[in-house]
Structures are given as C-alpha cells and as structure tokens.
Image (spheres, grey):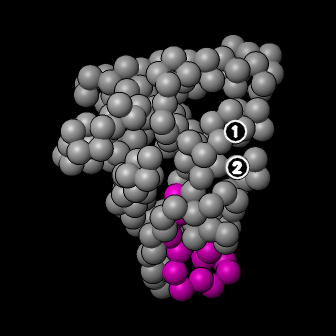
Amino acid sequence: MKNIVILISGGGSNMAAIVRTAQQERWDTRLGARVVAVMSNKADAGGLEFARDHGIATAVVDHKAYASREAFDDALMAQIDHYTPALVVLAGFMRILTPGFVNHFAGRLVNIHPSLLPAFAGLHTHQRAIDAGCKFAGASVHLVTADLDAGPIVEQGLVPVLPGDTAATLAARVLVQEHQIYPKAVRSLLERM
C-alpha cells in the first residue's frame, strides 16, 4: 500500500479535497494508496477533526515544544516515518522545513503554492500578482526542494485576475482551483510509483 501522510496547520481544506477525492475515486483499490495520517504543528488545527471523522489517524507535533527548528523537524520526521509514507503532502503546513527534513523525504515531499511558479514565490502572492498587473494568477503543485518554492512543478491551475480584485477575492478563486489540482497532482504522482 502507498501510504500518504498529510501535514496541515489550519482548516485543512486542501487535505479534505485530497481525502474526498481519494475516497470517491477509490484510490485504495485503483492505486493501492490511502491517506493514513494527518499531522499538524497546532493542536487546534480544524482539519484534524475532519481527518478523525473520516477514520484517519491524527497526530500533533507542536513546534513550540522544541528548542530548535531542527529538533522539531526531527520529531516530526519520526512521527511521519512511523507510517512509511510513499508521499508526504504539505497542505497549508505553515512551517519552513530544514534541509535535513527535505532531504529525508526527497522525491516524496509535495507542496501547493498559491501562484503560478516560478512567479511570486514566498508570501503575499495574490497582492503581488495584482500589483504587477497580471492578467492571470493561479496555483502550483511542486515537489519540495531545499530552495523555497523552486522544486519541479507537477501541476498548475490558472484563474483570471478580474478588474477590482482584491487579494482576498483572488485568493478565494485560487483556493477553488487548488482543491481541483492538488488531488489531481497527488493521483498523478501515485500513478508513477
């Protein structure tokens, strides 16, 4: 079985989209894959309840309990490794990961970013796209490397930037696109394994 571990920090809407798609498309029988655990660095992350309600194991590794980023990442790696994951999916996991963590899961660590990479890596992507006069924005699913938002792109989704858009209105439309492309990208990666 190809185990999937998903990391979240909040509501987990992309995680939920992946879980629902996996169930609807029967990834367990079609791809020999399943979401086995959802983990968070925050005990109050809303997505943990969704995961539990869908019979998925959950865990919290609170980054505030560790003296260094490396110590946190080591503890998180140990929790993840318990599930021998084929893929580790970052779905709104709001932590910058150490090179050791990234190297440990190299080729199996995937993230979604709310821009059409390589444009607008980092934060405030929607406002930056509006300020630059972009006609289109979107989201990118990419493999994670040690360089921020620079790994190989797996999937992208495009949305128009509309007259009068604010960062919030653009973000809402991009999120709808994220919910479509992230499950598709995860399925594509699983099919290649």
- 140 versus 47 height, above or below: below
Residue 95 visible in the snapshot: no
Q: Amino acid at mark 2?
A: Thr
Residue under label 2, please give it.
145
Q: Secondary structure at mark 2?
A: loop
Q: Is residue 155 magenta?
A: no
Q: From the top left corner, tell me how far across and down residue 175 is, in percent.
A: 42, 59
Residue under label 1, please give it.
102
The residue segment tinted magenta is 127-141
Residue at image location 48% in from the left, 85% down from the top: 163
Q: From the top left corner, tell me how far across and down residue 43 is, in percent.
A: 50, 20
Residue at image location 52% in from the left, 81% down from the top: 136
Q: Is residue 129 magenta?
A: yes
- 43 versus 121 height, above or below: above
Q: From the top left corner, tell me how far across and down residue 64 is, in percent.
A: 69, 19
Disc 1 + disc 2, Cβ < 8 Å: yes
- Front residue (pair 134, 71): 71
Q: Amino acid at mark 1?
A: Val
Q: From the top left corner, tell me how far across and down residue 128 is, in percent.
A: 66, 70
Residue 108 visible in the snapshot: yes
Q: Image quarter for residue 11?
A: top left
Query: Which class describes the residues within 10 Å of circle 1: few (<14), some (14-19), or many (20+)?
Result: many
Q: Image quarter for residue 184?
A: bottom left
